Image (cartoon, coloured by chain):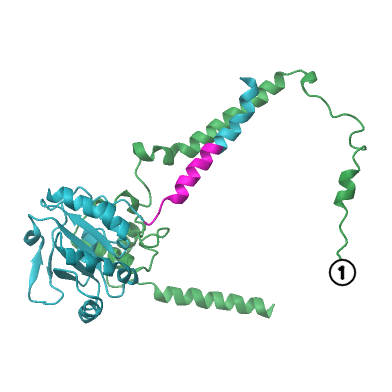
Chain colours: A cyan, B green
Amino acid sequence: MKRWQFLAPLALFAVLLGFLAVGLNLNPREVPSPLIGKPAPAFELARLDDPTQRITHADLKGQVWILNVWASWCVACRQEHPLLVDFAKRNPVPLYGLNYKDKRDDGLAWLRRFGDPYKASLYDIDGRVGIDFGVYGVPETFVIDKQGVIRFKQIGPVTPEVLRDEIEPLLKQLNA
Amino acid sequence: MPKFRFALLALCLAAAAHAADAPLTAAEPELEAKMLRISAELRCLVCQNQTIADSNAELAVDLRNQVRDMLRQGQSEQQIIDYMTARYGDFVLYRPPVRGATFLLWFGPAVLMVGGLAALVLVLRRRSRLGNEHFDPEEPGEDEAAPVSATAARPVKSAK
């Protein structure tokens, strides 16, 4: 017993090292959203391409859908955009955009230039709906089920891995 | 000295310029003060080590506006804090609430300190009870017999 006592500090150090290793590999930007498992917030917004037409949360109930928060000023949005365009072509579920704190003309020009994967983009000029969705870093992507409950949230650009390993299996499960 | 004076002047000017930036609306000083007090309790999600009151990130500006609007609607501080945590989670609170998951965070340092002190006291007490024979004095002459360190400490001549 006594002979191994000198190993105690080493063991403590190993434990500390373990904590630090885990801590270093966490991404502090990824704040767990309290909204997962909760009903998506209510909203009523004009369409980006048609200010006279309004879309509310009630219009989207009864189907599984994806909300992608984007803006023309958002550089990381360009990174994920081809993926979304490709996703929309396969069209497993409707993809809606939330154009976040953008100028209408800039947003429309951006869609013309990079392609428009969205069934519609909601125009959130003052970011209020964004706040309701707990948005703090664009792009963000939400998967919302038939009951209108948020089931998944991606902070930052969607990667092919996230789409393949997390979003698509979830969509299959929700639509089953 | 003149350089130092210049630096001081620059500092004062910078402070003055900063004061001019401060977005205090004189119209409702009371509301503004309350808004800033609540904002100082909320973490900015974009620049995470700043409060919403300190940060100039766009989201922080939006959230300050939100707090201001909610105060205007007559909502209480607790209602505003609840509103923010419902959207951004406990992470938005600069002072995390005391509960099971945060117990270690709040009391860990105190536990560590008490534990450390207790260990120290135990060790010292045990040692004070030990007889002299447990502490072997250094061999006399060992110091003198170690000129190696003296040579090592001599500065090495730089090779030019």
Q: Residue furthest front?
A: A90
Specify whether residue A106 is painted magenta: no
What is the quadrant of the N terminus of chain B in the image? Answer: bottom right
Q: Position of residue A69 (x, y in %)?
A: 24, 65
Q: For the residue carrying disc 1, how many other residues have a C-alpha within 10 Å: few (<14), some (14-19), or many (20+)?
A: few
Q: Position of residue B119 (x, y in %)?
A: 59, 28
Q: Is residue A5 left or right of residue B102?
A: right
Q: Is residue A41 left or right of residue B131?
A: left
In terms of secondary structure, what is the magenta stretch mainly? helix
State the extent of the magenta-drawn residues as a range.
A14-29
| B99 or A17: nearer the viewer | A17
Q: Amino acid at mark 1?
A: Lys
Residue at 34% in and 36% down: B100
Q: Is residue B128 left or right of residue A49?
A: right
> Is any atom of residue B80 visible in this view?
no
Q: Which residue is mark 1?
A: B160
Q: Which chain hosts label 1?
A: B
Report helix, strand or loop for mark 1: loop
Specify whether residue A28 is painted magenta: yes
Q: Is residue B25 left or right of residue A1?
A: left
Looking at the image, is A56 positioned above or below residue B100? below
Residue B116 appears in which quarter of the rendering?
top right
Looking at the image, is A155 positioned above or below residue B115? below
| B140 or B90: nearer the viewer | B140
What is the quadrant of the C terminus of chain B in the image? Answer: bottom right
- How many numbered circles does the render carry? 1
Q: Position of residue A12 (x, y in %)?
A: 55, 35
| B34 or B41: nearer the viewer | B41
Residue A63 appears in which quarter of the rendering?
bottom left
